[in-house]
Amino acid sequence: MLPRKRFVEAEVEDEVADAGLRKKTRSDCLISSASRAAAAEEGNHSGSANGMDMECDANGSNPPEIDEDLHSRQLAVYGRETMRRLFASNVLISGLNGLGAEIAKNLVLAGVKSVTLHDEGNVDMWDLSSNFFFSEGDVGENRALACVQKLQELNNAVIISTLTETLSKEHLSNFQAVVFTDISLEKAIEYDDYCRSQLPPIAFIKSEVRGLFGSVFCDFGPDFTVFDVDGEEPHTGIIASISNDNPALVSCVDDERLEFQDGDLVVFSEVHGMTELNDGKPRKVKNARPYSFTLEEDTTQFGAYTKGGIVTQVKQPKVLQFKSLRDALRDPGDFLLSDFSKFDRPPLLHLAFQALDKFRHDLGRFPVAGSEDDVQKLIALGVHINESLGDGKLEQIDKKLLHHFSHGSRAILNPMAAMFGGIVGQEVVKACSGKFHPLFQFFYFDSVESLPTEPLEPSDLKPMNCRYDAQISVFGSKLQKKLEEAKIFMVGSGALGCEFLKNLALMGVCCSQKGKLTITDDDVIEKSNLSRQFLFRDWNIGQAKSTVAASAAMAINPALHIEALQNRASPETENVFDDAFWESLDAVINALDNVTARMYIDSRCLYFQKPLLESGTLGAKCNTQMVIPHLTENYGASRDPPEKQAPMCTVHSFPHNIDHCLTWARSEFEGLLEKTPNEVNTFLSNPSAYASAMKSAGDAQARDLLERVLECLDRDRCETFQDCISWARLKFEDYFSNRVKQLTFTFPEDSATSTGAPFWSAPKRFPRPLQFSSSDPSHLHFVMAAAILRAETFGIPIPDWAKNPKKLADAVDAVIVPDFLPKTGVKIVTDEKATSLSAASIDDAAVINDLIAKLEECAKKLPPGFRMNPIQFEKDDDTNYHMDFIAGLANMRARNYSIPEVDKLKAKFIAGRIIPAIATSTAMATGLVCLELYKVLAGGHKLEDYRNTFANLALPLFSMAEPVPPKTIKHRDMSWTVWDRWIIKGDLTLRELLRWLEDRGLNAYSISCGTSLLYNSMFPRHKDRMDKKVVDVAKEVAKVEVPPYRRHLDVVVACEDDEDNDIDIPLISIYSP
Amino acid sequence: MSSPSKRREMDLMKLMMSDYRVEMVNDGMQEFYVYFHGPNESLYQGGVWRVRVELPDAYPYKSPSIGFVNKIYHPNVDEMSGSVCLDVINQTWSPMFDLVNVFEVFLPQLLLYPNPSDPLNGEAAALMMRDRPAYEQKVKEYCEKYAKPEDAGAPKEDISSDEELSEDEYDSSDEAVVGKPDP
């Protein structure tokens, strides 16, 4: 598939040719430097603060169009404006070690305008531990040159160039942001000073990962504007009342809690009575409460509030004054903390990184792993720097920590690179766009808990001249061997999965014949995956994710021993992932995108007592959770509340926001285009069976279904495209005019409830019918989409003129639309007969018989073999008219209720439940998980060594904590957790099982297997089962047989102790002999 | 609160301990029927409804789905599908609630105090607001016509022709009637 941005594509072709030469001169930067000059001139224009400007092209062409199919998931995080700013940004990455490679990958996927790679050094064996672009054949080549081609494959729209000469300050002037991953402090200070002095300033980021330690420093200049500090949608509220007071009290309806905070600014709209507030002026919130707040405004002289009104938060830009690196080194201010159990660590690491810089400056090399001598030198340098700090000096220096720091300092580990690559990538996006709050200014992190619990011998850390040398220098060759021989099951190979595969390949996990990585995913690659699932290319679209990902991972490390399957992980595939498979595993990694599958894998890990490494992302947020047998609680032990759903009546007749309209639109889409055509086909494939099924159901639902089927085959049957247009036009009339007229006839604007309160009060909005006009493009577009989809269900070819607005308008205007008369059943209350049952509810059975007769009559007139084509909603195809129809339905309904309409993209996000996703947070999550994987595979770690993380790169926030231990239940002298299972040997009867429990002081009242009840003490009928074998009852009732590979059956028992307290006992496995 | 894995068992048990008549289909715990009597002092007194209860996989974190099988005339119950629009069993459901709450408190409250401001059956709501006597009469007529004990309780003749039933005794409906007989 070709990118849409034609002119960019042409540019790219040139660039690829250049990349082929593997040498770029500065000429490639001329375009961007010219644009920077232009941007600087326009610096005062609105929207171009921080030197960011959409008009990026020197030749004055329009800003590039966003490829929405490719970037939809990322657009859902950033929005169009931020994406446009990204497309205009030129970024320098200096230092193409593993960290540099991760940052470059994230930025190229995000779609900046250009990335320039700078490195003067050559690839060596140690780079293979973390830079996934390198293979052993690249050793000895320049690092930047060795990356460029593979990086370009990730996104053709980004210009990628290289710089292999010594960097000078002048080079920097071509960029909006510069990133250094391996630079001396002296140079860093010089460059940072230069970047700050530019107009507009160039964002400067310095980041390092050294063994299990990492650091980031950001300086976006003395005066940086953040447009959106958190990336959250502005909060809103529906007003119930406003007082005439100083300050005024604003109360909102109690449908949803307000999320305003004191100091927030808000604007008002649609307020009746107190119309002075509708002036669009932002006003300040004070005393924010769940359903009310006070407003900093004297409303005593304003009109009295009558009804209506919406209050909306106005997001405020924030200006940050960054310190220079020179000043911040001496006076670092508050460090961003990630782990409260290590609150005193950041100042120490601040010192340690400076000591390391001095060490490298003095000796021209890194400390050697295992060298006690080098450790002492580093500590001495640290002590010396500390002494020079005066008031700010540390009381105590943790020498043990510096010990670890010294040993691992030369190594760039993949998990650390992945984590910091995510963080730094996000900071660059912030620098280029002003979206999200920047890291202010230092962040330090360590994961020393990842080291094996036993002390490492220096001899174990010696390089072996292999691609894992860096990792061996930190963890030793014993753990390296364990990693290579691990047996791991990874579930899913989407966004998280691709990142994990890269990490595992680099770490050497499952990279020997004894090791085995099994991955499974039943999904195929789509275009929208490509903006972050970086192992896939556009020529892979339509292929199985797991297979493509596996071969891409093997290209990173050919030793990876991997099997790729396409099975969905669910109870249906337990013949594939059977007991023997599960028992062979060392660990399970979840790379899933839904809770159901996560719950299922969790239950399997519990059952087979396997460690589960769980993670997930949502936009800029990510979380990781370690589930370790007997040490931690399981994934399912704590849950998020289920997603909120709008009440049925609201969606039905009283929408008050666009979500309600879209929910309704989706359900109408499904009803009209999928369910009814399916129902029609069910009838046609076996009319007599269908008729008898409907007769036997005999209820209102059956009647409703029959009416729909008949409508489709009789009155509304379409044979030509003109029929489809008529149908679409009449649907418009029905939905947006007749139904509204009926509703407002039943409930006129002034209707009151029994208490006299107005019926149409907030949050309900009074609807008004639409008057169709073929000159209204949105009306016409609706009819077009509806007619085209209708034609598809009837297999009618779509004529070319269908897409010509003029001809379509003529066709629509030819449709005869009958006048609407509201049903008056409820109004004529004086007439006894009208309100009695006669009209509304004639016997369903009689109606059903009548409908069936009509239907059978009508089926005779159909061409032989006639079937409809049901349409399943597919959100990601921009040409299928599905989203056009849904957005049309939702927006026309929104227009009925004066709700603000949305564009097709926004409609797609909401109706398609598109989960916002970006590469940065995904990469970071997998890095964090792999830091835990070292612990899991080494074994012997205690609970306090493990970490669960919640992070939000938008704020930024990192919150790491020890996992929660499992709940222990005690009964008599027994105790157990969720990880335990009780095993009973013998082919017991139900009575014997109850007896067994009774002997332990447990009175069972209910025994079940799967979702079937085997025994319940209240059902008299179940008494008959008492003397049957449990296994036989399961066979008869639950239809569960002990599978051939198993000798036991699991039952869930609910019981009480002798004091009638419920006791939550483990699963019971009954082993038949 | 006890383990969620055993909540279905516990809820079912508590319902029966509270003398509700529960009808299981093939001993499945995901979907069953409960017989619900119109509350005393309400327009629905004397009516009996067979109420379908569906417990989703995520129960009790996710709310049960509740539907009237035989017809009821009520502003907040869809006349066609029998589905109920009630915040406590939809939006504001909490895992602390159980099925006894649904049948002892939520449904009786709904039948005693309909909320015509958020109607699912617009016609019933409009009638209730405008002409109370006519509304009350219609509610009672519906009860009379559709919610006599035999309307709810009598097993449908059609089921007996159901092929599955003939073979296996466990495929038949299980009914536990404890204490209170049908009025």
Image (cartoon, rainbow, N blue to C red):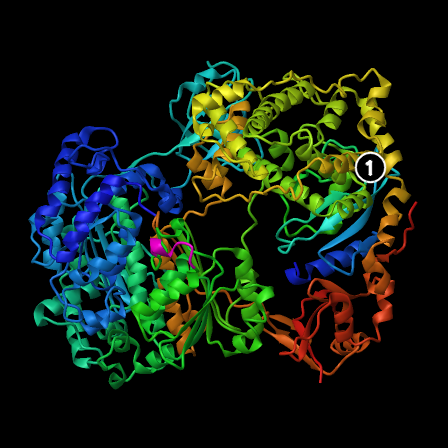
One can see residue A92 in this view: no
* Camera-side residue of A382 and A798: A798
Give the crowd class for mark 1: few <14, some 14-19, many >=20 residues within 10 Å: some
Query: Residue at the spot x=69%, y=59% of the render?
Result: B7
Q: Is residue A985 left or right of residue A931?
A: right
Task: Verify whether residue A631 appears in magenta.
Answer: no
Number of callouts in the render?
A: 1
Q: Within the image, what quadrant is residue A315 found in? A: top left
Q: Secondary structure at mark 1?
A: helix
Residue A953 or residue A343, whichever sits in front:
A953
Q: Which quarter of the rendering shows the C terminus of chain A?
A: bottom right
Q: Residue furthest front?
A: A864
> What range is drawn magenta here?
A537-543
Q: Is residue A895 visible?
A: yes
Report whether A376 appears left or right of A606: left
Expressed as whole percent of the image width and height from the top left, the position of residue A684 reads 70, 44
Compared to residue A114, the image places residue A881 above or below, namely above
Image location of residue A587, percent across then percent down:
46, 73
Residue ID at (84%, 71%)? A1025
Label 1, on which residue?
A849
Q: Is residue A893 left or right of residue A97?
A: right
Vertical comparison of B160 with A1064: above or below: above
Q: Please name whichever residue, A675 or A227, is drawn nearer the observer in this view of the structure.
A: A675
